[in-house]
Image: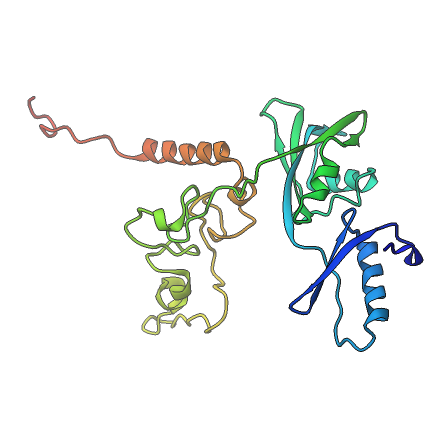
Amino acid sequence: MTLGLHHSKLVAQSASMHAGNLSVATDVVASDKDLRCFKEAAHKAFPYALQIDAALPTSTSYLKLVDVPYIANDKAITPDVVIAHLGKSGISDLTVLQVPPRVVRDSRMSDMCTVYLNVADSVSGARAKALIGRGVQFGRYVAYVRAARANPGLPLCQRCWKWGHPTPACRAPQSKCPICAGPHCKEHHRALAGCCKGNAKVNPPIPATPEGAACPHPARCMNCRKNHASDDRRCNFWRHHFDRDWIKARYDEVSAKCNSRSPPAHHPAGRGGRT
């Protein structure tokens, strides 16, 4: 069966019903236009149905664009620029992105980068098969689609709020608050943090933060040391949470600064003592 009457060339090869859901196998992956045609045809076939929807089985294919120019017009490429080039390419109908593209420079001195794409796909991976090997034009360069491994990025511990280990593997002696770094969980910040619990004994009294309201005081990130909470997605660590080397380098910098500020070790014999 074809959907030619609905201006679609999609061919339905077989269909089966299970638990009130109609599953239709097609020759290629249905586009958004094809899904609308299916929905229209289903409404005509089942006029008394209360609710009809058409959607693809959910799956993710992990792909990458290699040899993408990192610098264009004296500016670093951004996910929005990548999306614009994908929209102008001949594969725009196939690149249904689940999240914005992730741009990773090949090296600090390189003028090229790799762009990682999480593409919404059918269970069989039909879109990925159709995309691999295809090219996308970036000025005078052509970047080709290759298969990539799934990369969930580094985990952020929900106990100490440091990157690089999952919460069950945390070895910190106690939990920390991502807002103020105090020895309590985020849910108890208002009741236990000095900035929010208030103090009625001082003059003038310091009012407590209203229940249910967000902390209005400056936060302190335990990772980048800037004025935001450690779980704030605007943090540079969030932006680089796929880049293990970058995060390790930043932690090494912080450790080196802390060591340089620490006082020299006390001589075992004491000041002016003999060895």
Q: Is residue 74 visible?
A: no
Q: Residue 196: which quarter of the image?
A: bottom left
Q: Position of residue 198 (x, y in %)?
A: 38, 69
Query: Where the C terminus falls, by quadrant?
Result: top left
User: Farthest left residue?
Assistant: 274
Q: Which of 80 and 115 is in front in this view?
A: 115
Query: Where the N terminus falls, by quadrant?
Result: bottom right
Total numbered labels placed on residues in the image: 0
Q: In this view, does 104 lie to the left or right of 187?
A: right
- 245 vs 151: above or below: above
- 113 vs 235: above or below: above
Residue drawn 38% across the image and 60% down it: 185
Q: Where is residue 21 in the image (x, y as percent from the top left)?
A: 69, 66
Q: Is residue 196 visible?
A: yes
Q: Residue 36: which quarter of the image?
A: bottom right
- 174 vs 148: above or below: below
Q: Which of 133 and 73 is in front in this view?
A: 133
Q: Where is residue 139 in the image (x, y as percent from the top left)?
A: 81, 28
Q: Which of 268 and 88 is in front in this view?
A: 88
Residue drawn 74% across the image and 73% down it: 51
Residue drawn 61% across the image and 33% down it: 104
Q: Where is residue 173 in the image (x, y as percent from the top left)?
A: 28, 50
